[in-house]
Amino acid sequence: MSDSVAPIRVLVADDQRVTREGLMLLVGLNEGMEVVAGASDGAEAVALSQEHRPDVVLMDLAMPGTDGLTATRTLREIAPGTAVLVLTTYADDASVFPALRAGAKGYLTKDAGADEIERAIRAVHGGRIWMDPVVQERLVAAVTSGLPPQSETVPDSAPSTSPITTPEPSRPVRDVPAPLPERLTAREAEVLALIGQGLSNAEIGERLYLSRATIKTHINRIFAKTGVRDRAQAVRYAHRNRLVD
């Protein structure tokens, strides 16, 4: 990369300090990127954006005080040259569509890998749109149906963004307790149990004969229902509720 090319200036907004500082470190390791500030809520994200003029704001949605949605809307008005890339726990209709209407140029969930976060930052900085595969599915469903997709109607055979073999009928991992905690479905309990065993999304998909996009959909629903915010909390939740032996 030429030394004359200015780095992409990134601001990270997340109320959880460990998550925020981890993301700042991760983003700063990428060639051609510079982290200019970290914000603990939406109001601070707006204030620091006015001060540092970042190219991209990596924005959590669920923050106390001024949330990420309000901050995104404000930045669209006062800093139209700053691209907001949402990085949040949930990919349900109540989160995705308001964020896009507020002006977000990209939307990722927090199980995104470092490479995907890097690609997304570069994409929105370059004027392109970047969406998590689950969000893409919801947008396609909204366009084809004329209505936002319902959170409980995505079938187990939902299409993946990458080619996969035709799935065979899924098989249960183990017996799950009844009644299930937090209104989890039997499939969600199976996925959560496998998370509790330390399996990756790809490994869970192979075990249940489901696409990775479908696994991500189930994980987003699990996070929304149980209130966990990351994979580590999901593992603890699965053990606490005896979904894992």
Image (cartoon, rainbow, N blue to C red):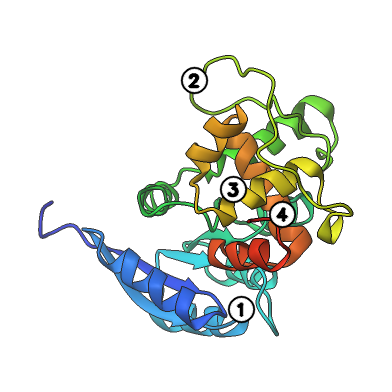
Q: Residues within 10 Å of mark 1 (few under 14, many from 20)?
A: many
Q: What element carries label 4?
A: helix
Mark 3 lies on a secondary structure that is helix
The residue at 73%/46% (across/down) is 188
- Quadrant hosting residue 59: bottom right
- Give the residue pinned by disc 2: 163
Q: Distance between the residues labelled 4 and 2?
A: 25 Å
Q: Residue 148 versus residue 55: which sits nearer the camera?
A: 148
Per the image, the residue denoted by label 4 is: 222
Q: Please tell me which residue is depicted at 63% across the width and 25% down the height of the picture.
A: 159
Specify which label sits upstream in the sequence, 1 or 3. 1
Distance from disc 2 to disc 3, alpha carbons, whole Å, reads 23 Å
Q: Distance between the residues labelled 4 and 1?
A: 25 Å
CB atoms of marks 4 and 1 within 8 Å: no
Q: Distance between the residues labelled 4 and 3?
A: 12 Å
Q: Say which residue appears at 71% left-offset and 54% top-offset.
A: 222
Could you tell me which secondary element the residue under label 1 belongs to? helix
Q: Position of residue 237 (x, y in %)?
A: 67, 66
Query: Mark 3 — residue?
Result: 194
Total numbered circles: 4
4 and 2 marks in contact (CB < 8 Å): no
Q: Where is residue 228 in the image (x, y as percent from the top left)?
A: 67, 67
Q: Please, is residue 191 above or below residue 142 in the view? A: below
Q: How crowded is mark 4: few (under 14 residues within 10 Å), some or many (20 or more)?
A: many
Quadrant of the image occupied by residue 154: top right
In front: 140, or 76? 140
Q: In this view, does 214 lie to the left or right of 185?
A: left
